[in-house]
Image (cartoon, rainbow, N blue to C red):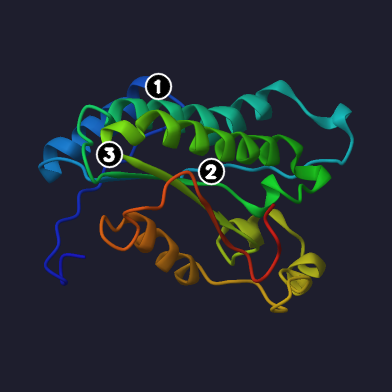
């Protein structure tokens, strides 16, 4: 980013902690000279057995706080800095539409983020703040080899109409489009799928 003449600041934080999450937003605004776009992208999943009985409170709490609470806290804190033409972009998932049983808790948070996106778009539209979401499908990230065995990895993404998993960079254009105050000036309350052809509805 710096080679491209842009400023970058590193603000490590545990977004499960409300005060750390809020401070991260304030520090970003202070060090960058304001905020125009907030991307809520933190996510955690832990595949477990398919039965509801395998869901434990400790992991449920971690998933909910990372994926959902942090989005509420960061968005709320950012409102002090966002204004006309600003954008909030949430990261949901194909799991919101086609949930896998071992990801019951994760998929639930992603469905909730879809709802939050539409609700915030309604609430913040009068301020000129657009709220949208990107719903990736199977994407090659470090999460995949860390949470899946070799046999599943070989088939990962093969069930999409495009027949493969996506690369992280293939999601970038969706975020750039939704962040643009000109190209996406009339786009709000939308979930944009980057799923290799898997339907989101």
Q: Is residue 102 above or below residue 172?
A: above
Q: Is residue 145 above or below residue 79?
A: below
Q: Tell me the CA gap for discs 1 and 3.
A: 26 Å
Which labelled disc corresponds to residue 66? none
Q: Is residue 79 above or below residue 162?
A: above
- Residue at (45% x, 70% y) in the render: 169
Q: Is residue 181 above or below residue 87?
A: below
Label 1 or label 3, whichever comes before in sequence order: 1
- Residue at (73% x, 79% y) in the render: 163
Q: Nearer the viewer, mark 1 or mark 3?
A: 3
The answer to whether the residue labelled 1 contacts the one labelled 3, judged by CB atoms less than 8 Å apart, is: no
Image x and y of residue 63, in percent:
61, 33
Identify the residue position indicated by label 3 in the image.
128
Q: For the residue labelled by badge 3, is the local secondary structure a helix, a strand or a loop?
A: loop
Image x and y of residue 46, in percent:
68, 42
Residue 40 visible in rendering: no
């Amino acid at each position: 980013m710096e080679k491209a003449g842009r400023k970058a600041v590193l603000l490590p934080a545990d977004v499960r902690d409300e005060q750390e999450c809020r401070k991260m937003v304030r520090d970003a605004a202070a060090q960058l000279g304001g905020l125009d776009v907030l991307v809520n992208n933190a996510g955690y999943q832990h595949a477990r057995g398919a039965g509801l009985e395998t869901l434990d409170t400790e992991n449920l709490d971690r998933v909910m706080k990372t994926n959902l609470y942090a989005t509420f806290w960061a968005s709320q804190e950012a409102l002090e800095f966002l204004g006309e033409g600003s954008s909030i972009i949430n990261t949901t998932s194909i799991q919101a539409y086609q949930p896998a049983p071992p990801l019951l808790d994760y998929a639930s948070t992603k469905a909730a983020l879809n709802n939050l996106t539409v609700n915030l778009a309604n609430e913040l539209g009068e301020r000129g703040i657009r709220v949208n979401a990107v719903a990736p499908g199977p994407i090659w990230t470090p999460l995949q080899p860390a949470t899946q065995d070799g046999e599943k990895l070989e088939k990962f993404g093969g069930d999409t109409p495009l027949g493969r998993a996506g690369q992280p960079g293939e999601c970038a254009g969706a975020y750039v489009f939704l962040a643009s105050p000109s190209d996406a000036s009339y786009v709000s309350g939308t979930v944009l799928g980057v799923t290799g052809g898997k339907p989101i509805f």
